[in-house]
Image (cartoon, helix red, strand yellow):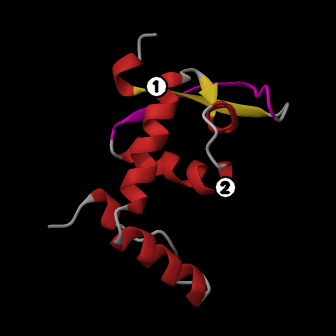
Amino acid sequence: MTTLFDNPLSRATDPPASRSAGRKISASDKRMAKAMTLTNAVKRFPNRTMREVCTYANLDYESYHKRAKDAESAGWIVRGPERECEVTGHRAATWKVVNDVNN
């Protein structure tokens, strides 16, 4: 059975190393586990930018922000309005878990 987390992470034009890494994380449970960890962090820190969520939850931004699209596609989190990020000072989307959409 194919799941959302079986979808390729790389493009055909990406270097072989990138395609290999994408296949490796998708074949393991790490991709889904990271998306779930990120979703739990968004639940703890709703209406925050992804950089803020990762910073406040002590998650490595480079490892976890890429799983936001997976969690969004799974219907676990949704994008909120953009605002200035407290960490970077740049405008960025905020995030919240689907169950907390009205908050």
User: What amino acid does circle 2 point to?
Assistant: Glu
**Residue 10 image point, x, y percent:** 51, 73
Which image quarter is the N terminus in? bottom left
The relative height of residue 24 versus residue 70 in the rendered view (above or below) is: below
Q: CA distance from mark 2 to mark 1?
A: 19 Å
Q: Nearer the viewer, residue 17 or 102?
A: 17
In the depicted structure, whether residue 35 falls above or below residue 21: above
Residue at the bottom extreme, as displayed: 16
* Residue 96 in the figure: left or right of residue 4: right
Q: Is residue 13 above or below residue 10?
A: below
Disc ID at residue 75: none
Residue at horizontal 47%, vertical 68%?
9
Q: Which mark is residue 62?
A: 2
| Residue nearest the viewer, comparing 77 with 24 | 24
Which residues are drawn in magenta?
75-87
Number of marks present in the image shown: 2
Q: Position of residue 47 (x, y in %)?
A: 58, 21
Residue 71, position in %: x, y?
41, 44
Helix, strand or loop under label 1: helix
Task: Determine whether 75 is above or below 24 in the image.
Answer: above
Residue shown at 37%/26% (left/top)? 98
The secondary element bearing badge 2 is classed as helix
Q: Which residue is mark 1?
A: 43
Principal SS element in the magenta part? strand
Furthest-top residue in view?
103
Residue under the point 68% across and 31% down: 52
* Magenta-colored stretch includes residue 80: yes
Toward the right, the furthest residue is: 89
Is 3 positioned to the left or the right of 1 in the image? right
Name the amino acid type tagged 1.
Lys
Q: Nearer the viewer, residue 17 or 29?
A: 29
